[in-house]
Structure formats: C-alpha cells, structure tokens
Amino acid sequence: MTASILPLRVRGVSFAVNGESLLRDLDFELPAGGVTIVLGPNGAGKSLTLRLCHGLLQPTAGSIDWGGAGAANAARRQAMVFQRPVMLRRSALANVAFALGAHGVPRPERAARARAALERVELGRVAHRSARALSGGEQQRLALARAWALEPEVLFLDEPTASLDPAAAHAVEEVIRAIDAAGTRIIMTTHDLGQARRLAADVIFLHGGRLLEHAAASEFFDNPRTDEARAFLEGRLFW
C-alpha cells in the first residue's frame, strides 16, 4: 500500500507581493478524508491559498509541508483543477492520455485508463470529440477526469462550478462526490453556499487574508464564531 502524504500542515503562512500582504499567518492542518471547503468574500485569499498549498507559489513566510510517510512523493500525489481549465487542441480522450503520459504512465496503459476516466464522468460518448468543442460543463468534467485519472491522493478544486448553469453544476458536483467516495482528499473553493453545505465535511473561512474560522461544516453553518462569518452567511456586506 502506498504511504500517505497527509496530513497537510500549514504553519504561519504569509504571502506578500511588492510589499502588499495578501495572506497573513495562516495556520491549519488537514488530515486524510473528506471535503474541505474554503469560503470567504472576493479578495479573501481563497484561490491564493490553494495555489500555495499545491506548490504553485511559495509563501513569503511560514511553511507548508506534507506530514505523511509518503511526503517525498507529494508533488506527484496531488492535482489541481481550475475554474477555467485549459483544453489541449485534441480530443477529450487525448487530453486525458496526454496528462497520463506527462505523469509517467506507460504508453500501453494510457488509452484504457483515459477511457475509464471519461466513463466515470459520463463523457465516454464524446471521447473522440474535440475538447474545445465541448460545453463548459463538459470541459469541467473533462478536467476532473484528467486529474482523477492520475489517481491523486489530494485534489485541489478552484471554483469548479463558478461559470456553469445549475444542471452542469449539479453534474460536476456528482463527479466531486464520486472522487471523494473513491478516497481522494478534496480541498475546494466556492462562492456557492448551498454547494458548500452539500459537500463540505469542514470549512476554512478566510477574510482579509486571514483565517478566521476552521470548523466542522455543521458547526460553521449552524454556529459561526465570528461576526465576519455570520455576516457572510447572511449575505451582508462587510469590510
């Protein structure tokens, strides 16, 4: 059995650009299992936090590390899907196969694994259609299939349904539930409070670049501890 890279430990993390502090003193730990939803108003630092955790950016201060026995392989055991994923100029099937190849999967295995990934997200029927000709919802499911095919232990999702209509968003949520059920740890940002309530096991709430709350989802939604979180959940503007 492959050793886990979890927990993810974020300790005193800050991030600044040209002297402007965007994140300050983030401190949390995420063990294995479940879906963590990162909430907060625009500019709170949600997407930035995901990029730091995934290693796309380095913190100005503090540390981010993987505490499991498999930490040495952390870079290969995680994946990220963005709000507007980039589709290669090739078929849906070839998009997934290309990712597998880049990840070092032997060529004879790629086609079968890519097709299986498409079937899991109900895109088997469009396997040979140009990825860029798919609808927005189909492209997002393809991006999830491309990431899921890599069998990551941790998957970061940045606003995966932000630009989708309700039906397409529902289909993406079903894929997220399936990935979670298969054992992948998910860390996800969203502005959709209904979606957060449906998916979250725990919630990280950011405001003004600071972590104000980290709690089980039921505790956060039923009894937020801070005025900022209460205002956010009630739809009130605050600064």
Image (cartoon, rainbow, N blue to C red):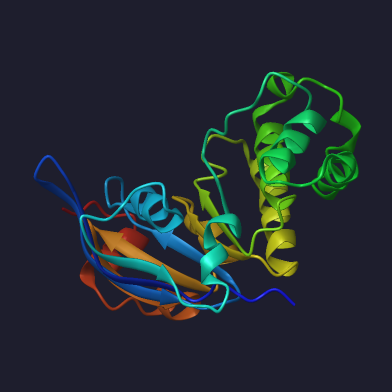
Nearer the observer, 31 or 181:
31
Nearer the observer, 118 or 2:
2
Task: Report x, y in % for residue 159.
Answer: 50, 46
Looking at the image, residue 17 sits to the left or right of residue 101; the answer is left
Task: Report x, y in % for residue 209.
Answer: 22, 56
Q: Image point 51% across, 78% down: which residue?
A: 31
Looking at the image, residue 50 sits to the left or right of residue 101; the answer is left
Q: Image point 28% across, 78% down: which residue?
A: 225
Nearer the observer, 202 or 69:
69
Q: Is residue 4 above or below residue 77?
A: below
Task: Report x, y in % for residue 41.
Answer: 31, 51
Looking at the image, residue 77 sits to the left or right of residue 209; the answer is right
Q: Is residue 91 above or below residue 85?
A: above
Where the N terminus falls, by quadrant? bottom right
Q: Image point 33% across, 76% down: which residue?
A: 224
Q: Image point 75% across, 60% down: which residue?
A: 178
Looking at the image, residue 170 sits to the left or right of residue 189; the answer is right
Count of numbered marks: 0
Task: Report x, y in % for residue 5.
Answer: 55, 71
